Structure formats: C-alpha cells, structure tokens
Image (spheres, grey):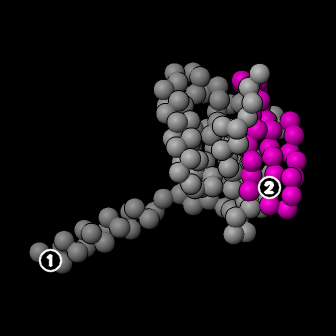
C-alpha cells in the first residue's frame, strides 16, 4: 500500500512539472514581442514567463487575464488574430528599453518597459501605472 501511495505521489509530481517550457528572450524586443503576443493570444502562462515577477506586475497581469477571460468569444478571437503594431522600441540605457505598440484589433497605444535582470530581458508593466492620460 505504501509503495502504491509513493508511486501516485511521484506520478503527480512528474505531471506537475510537465508544463510548457519557453525560450528566454534574446533581447528586449524579443521579450516585448513574446509577452505581447502571449497576452493577445490569452496565453497568460507564457506572458508570465516574460514578466518581471514582483507583486505589482503579478497583480496587473492577473487583472489583464481576468479581463481577457470575461470577453466574449469573438472578441478574444479578434485579439488572437490581431497583429502587433510596434510604434517605438527605444533603449533608455543598457538595461531598460521602452516598447510602444498597438494592435490591428484595437488601436490603443500601450508602452511597457523591458528590463534586464540577471541577464534576462523581462517586461515590467508598472510603467503603465505611471503613464499620464490626457
């Protein structure tokens, strides 16, 4: 009985680790593109992979996911079919880049910061909170 229980636990642990794997971003532009595409597709596991993990960013991405999940099926499909329209990709310094974009479904302009932490390029959404709205 103990052996059966141990086998079940081992199987569950292996199943939990069998999730998707993603490639690290090659540069800031790649991180931004991967994050934006994942967000448009509703693939929030992948979006989180390219996100700087801190409490504010995790809260923001959770809100984005809730909003996406509450959209009707046609709207979600329109986002999935949308193309990313980069407007400006600008290096602030060697570890911060701004990525301003819109998409072909909704023409709203959004700017995210992409930061290099421990050699990895990751999206930092907090700048959205600091954006001034006219």
Whether residue 46 appears in this view of the structure is: no
| Residue 101, position as x, y percentages in the image | 79, 36
Q: Nearer the viewer, residue 13 or 91?
A: 91
| Residue that appears at 11% across and 75% down | 1
Residue 111 lies in the magenta-colored region? yes
Q: Which mark is residue 2?
A: 1
Q: Position of residue 10 (x, y in %)?
A: 31, 72
Identify which residue, 131 or 123, lies in the foreground: 131
Residue 25 appears at what percent x and percent y? 72, 59
Question: Disc count in the image?
Answer: 2
In percent of width and height, residue 45 lies at: 54, 49
Magenta residues? Answer: 87-115
User: In the picture, which quadrant includes the C terminus?
Assistant: top right
**Which residue in the structure is indicated by mark 2?**
96
Against 26, residue 81 (above or below) is above
Left or right for 38, reference 59: right
Whether residue 67 is visible, yes or no, is yes
């Amino acid at each position: 009985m103990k052996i059966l229980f141990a086998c079940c636990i081992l199987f569950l642990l292996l199943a939990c680790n069998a999730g998707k794997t993603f490639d690290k971003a090659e540069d800031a532009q790649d991180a931004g593109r991967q994050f934006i595409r994942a967000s448009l597709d509703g693939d929030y596991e992948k979006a989180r992979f390219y996100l700087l993990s801190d409490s504010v960013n995790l809260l923001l991405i959770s809100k984005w996911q809730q909003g996406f999940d509450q959209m009707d099926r046609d709207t979600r499909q329109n986002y999935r079919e949308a193309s990313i329209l980069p407007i400006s990709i600008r290096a602030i310094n060697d570890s911060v880049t701004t990525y301003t974009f819109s998409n072909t479904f909704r023409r709203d302009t959004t700017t995210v910061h992409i930061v290099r932490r421990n050699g990895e390029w990751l999206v930092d959404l907090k700048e959205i909170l600091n954006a001034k709205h006219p």
